[in-house]
Every structure is written in structure tokens, then in C-alpha cells.
Amino acid sequence: MTDAKLIFGKLSKTIHRGFKFDRMFPSDDLDPNALLELDQLALVSMKTQDAPRSVMEKVVRLLRDFGQKQDLQRYGRYLLKRQRSRTSTEIPSVLPSAFLPEDDRDNGPLAKMRKNPAFKDLFDHAGVSNMDDSSLRRLAVAHKEDRRHVLYQMFWSPEAALTYLAHRYPATCAANFRVLYELARRAPEFQPRRVMDYGAGPAPGITAVQEIWPGIMEYATAIEPSEHMTQLGKYLTTDLEMPAIHWQRCLYDSIEEPLDLIIASYVQMEVKGQESRDALVKRLWARLRPGGVLVLIEPGTPTGFRFMHNTRELLISRVGPENFHFVAPCPHEGMCPLALTGRDWCHFSQRVRRTPHRVYCKGSTRRFMEEEKFSFLCIRRSPGPRSKYRCEEHAPTAHEKSYFWPRIMFPVIKAGGHSLIDVCCAPQNFERISVSKSKAHSFGYRWSRKAMWGDLWRFPKRVARPEARLYIPEKTREHLDRLAKRAWKALKWEENEPGYVEEKERDQQFYGH
Ligand SMILES: C[S@@+](CC[C@H](N)C(=O)[O-])C[C@H]1O[C@@H](n2cnc3c(N)ncnc32)[C@H](O)[C@@H]1O
């Protein structure tokens, strides 16, 4: 008699063994070190950030010696009001894309405008007659949005510059650090020897470069038109162990030698007009050497995202995806799926420690952390792994594989026993992945519980909803379609219907066609 029968008697045969065998999934790479490397590459978001200690000590000293706390705080509120971007409720519906096919080539509103003699002079005078419809729409939306949310060009007086330091410096420094940290992780062979910080202000960009690649910089230039900002920047960067920074008033003062890294953080929000912003991006792009990187950071608001979206489309349509690639945040060089939702905008968050309350209080004394929301683009001027290799499996190194992973676009929804993750992934999809606890480890449930907004998702995809954040339920959508069809029918006048001729005449009288 076996041991089990001795112990359980007859029951041993009937006991239901309520466990499932663990399933082993074939893995190409079972080496724990390689898996660890993949995991760490996917964790690109960072926890709470502090500005470098030596720099913050200088900031505190400056604020204590030169600023009246109450005055600075009052000025800070003014600065916030001036630079505040719109909220989510005011997001522009759908951002125009150069890649969307025109629905009605001859009957769309722009085509009608072109045909209309009343607009002939306007088109000729403004020199837009040779512009394609999507560029025209892009400019029109930018103009409308810029007017709705007036971009404010600050006069950086000594008080304003000092207030900016207290109010914004830790946050902008953290955003710069977060973006450059990801660049260093995902392009490990990239060594920025010649660096430019455009619109440098107190130069958080150069400080972050020095923190991430210590001792690498051979030449650094900071472009800053404001005298007072320049003084602050010079003071804060004097002790950095790097060659002296060349401070310039404008881009054209410097020698035209190509650069490895150009950073323009929180600058476009002070440049008025989409055409000026486009020209700025083109000028910066032209100063990069092949293989160099352009980093653009803006506030994480619909306006900041609009700037990033415009730059994206400009580069894809003019430079061509075979000549550059996005290191971050986009996992593809196609149309931006978030811009098409008209509800969301691509932005990320970085928790940061504020300036100490004893020298500057930003609202409440109870809060000593804040979430800095930012939109960014990190663009490298060379073909990337996505154009070199066909898929993730073909990419030989872990960091090259990471260019194929989707990006987590919102905080993970941690439900009971499963997680829902909104990701942006190639080709041009914004979708919701679901991972459940009952699946094997290789599906990444455990990892998903720790994943942060902005991380990469390196596990297999089980798509729960092809269109993430299904804004309109299917039934409502069908109903809207029916209503639209009925309305369309009602609008269409049949020629033999009563009243058709009178209506046509009235149209002619009003619109001239
Ligand atoms: C909001 S501050 C940002 C400073 C710094 N880059 C940061 O991230 O904290 C904007 C800076 O851009 C500068 N600026 C504004 N318009 C500019 C332009 N057209 N060209 C260069 N710099 C400009 C301003 O003088 C100001 O110092």
C-alpha cells in the first residue's frame, strides 16, 4: 500500500487537487542578467527628483540675500498666471495631421475657399496658394489656438528672473534630467561633447548634461537673450566641473560648427507664431551633426503638446523618417494617434522637491513636492533601430530592442487581479492592454503593478480595447451616426423639391457662389 493510501484511506483517490501546474512559456532569453537588463531599460520614469544640491544651495543663498519673500511670492503668482497654459477642457478638438488623407479633395471647406473668388486676393497676397491643405489647416489651428491662449513673452527683470528661479527651476531641472536620463539609457553610445542650451535661462539643461555625462562635455554654449537670466545662469553654473560655458545673446553669434546635443526647454512657449516656431526648430536642426540629438521640452499642457505635434509632423514630412528617429517618447515615426483623439495630449509627469519653504512658498506650506507635467521630444539625426531592423527579435542589443516597445501613456489602472495599461505603440496605435494575475510571469503582471506613467512596456500585448479610452460607447456612436445621416439627408435639397430654387438664390446672394 502506498503512503498516500495509508494516510488518507479511500479518500486519496477522490481528493480534488485544486492546483494548476505552472505553465512554462518558451523564452528566447532565459539568462536572468539579460532579463534584468531588459526590465531596467523599460523603467525609464524616475521617482522624486531633487535639483543638484550644490546648485540648490546657491539658489537658496540668492533668494535669501536678494529677495523679499512676500514680494517674490506675489511675483510668482503673476508669473504663473502669465505662463499658465490651457486646461484639458479647452483642448483643440483634433489636431490636423499631414498624414491624414483629405476626405473630400474638392468639396472640403478649404477647397471651397480656394475656389471662392472672394478669397482669391487673400490667398495670393498671403502667398499660401502653393500650400497644401494640411499645412494650411495646421497654421490656421495654430493661429486660432495662439490667439485663444495668448503666448506671453516675459520681460525678465531681475525680480522676474529671481522668481523664476524659486518658482520653476527645480521643476525644469527635473524635467531636463528625466529626459536626458532616458536618452543616456537608450542610446548608450551617444556622448555629447558639444552641447547647446537654447533659451538657457538658469541653464538647467547644461546642469543636467553635466550630471548625467560627467566630464564628457568639451564645449558648451548657452543662448540667452535676457541679461538678468544670463547673470543667474552664469552664477549657478560656475562650480560645475566642465569647460567654461559660452554665453550668447542669439544663435548667430557662435561659430557654425555642428553640435552633438541641442536642448530647447520651455522656450517655444515664448515664441509667437507657428511659422516662427517652425523656423526655430529648423535652425536648431540644421546645427546638429549627423547622429546628434535635439531635445525639446515644453509644459505638459495641450499647448505644449501642440508644439511637439507640429515639430513631429514637420520633421516626418520634410526630413523624412529614413533620416532621423525619435528616441523618446514616440515608439514610431508615424502619425500621432493621441492628436487624433481630440481628448488627450501626450505628456508625462515627474515628481520633484520644491524650493524650501523658508525662502519661497509656492502656495501651501504643507506640500513640499509637486508633479511637473511636461511634453517632450528627443530626436536623433540618424536612422534608428526601427528602420535598421524589421522587428524586436532582430535587434541584437537590449537598448535597440527598447525602440520597439510601446510607451505607457497614462498611470496604470490597477484593478483587482488585473491591470489596464494605456499605451502608444507602432504602427500609430493608442490602445489599452490588459494583464491579468492568472497569466504566467512572462506576461508582466507583477511588473505592471510597479510600472509608472512614461515607462516602456516590454511584455507581450493582449489588447483589451483597440481604441484606448473608448470615449463614446458603441451604442451612442451608432445613434450619432444615425442622427448625422438623417441631418445630412435633411440638408440635401433635391432639385425638384419645393423651395429649392429660392434657397439656391438666397445662397448665391449671401455667399456669392
Ligand atoms: C521659461 S525660460 C526657460 C529657461 C530654461 N530653458 C529652463 O528650462 O528653465 C525661457 C527662456 O527663453 C528665453 N527666450 C525667449 N524667447 C527666446 C528666443 N526667441 N530665443 C532664445 N531665447 C528665448 C527667455 O529669455 C528665457 O530665459
Image: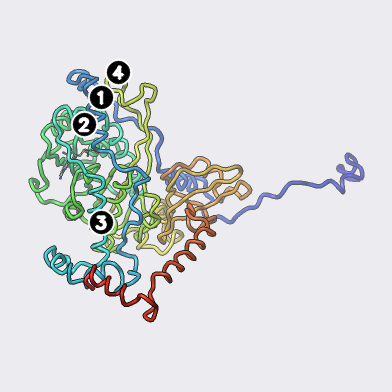
Label 2 vs 3, first from the N-terminus: 2
Distance, label 2 to label 1, CA atoms, is 29 Å
Left/right placement of residue 300 relative to residue 424 reads: left
Distance, label 4 to label 2, CA atoms, is 26 Å
Q: Nearer the viewer, mark 4 or mark 2?
A: 4
Q: Pick the quarter of the image with the C terminus.
A: bottom left
Left/right placement of residue 447 relative to residue 427 reads: right
Q: Nearer the viewer, mark 3 or mark 1?
A: 1
Q: Secondary structure at mark 3?
A: loop
* Residue at the spot of label 2: 240
Ligand 1 under 8 Å from disc 1 Cβ: no
Q: Are marks 3 and 1 in contact (CB under 8 Å)?
A: no
User: What residue appears at the point 22 percent right and 44 percent down from the top-left corner?
Assistant: 150
Which label sits on residue 381? 3
Badge 1 density bin: few <14, some 14–19, many ≥20, Cα 10 Å: many
For ligand 1, give the image quadrant: top left
* Residue at the spot of label 1: 73
Q: Nearer the viewer, mark 4 or mark 1?
A: 1
Badge 4 density bin: few <14, some 14–19, many ≥20, Cα 10 Å: few
Q: Quadrant of residue 492?
A: bottom left
Q: Is 164 or 493 nearer to us in this picture?
A: 493
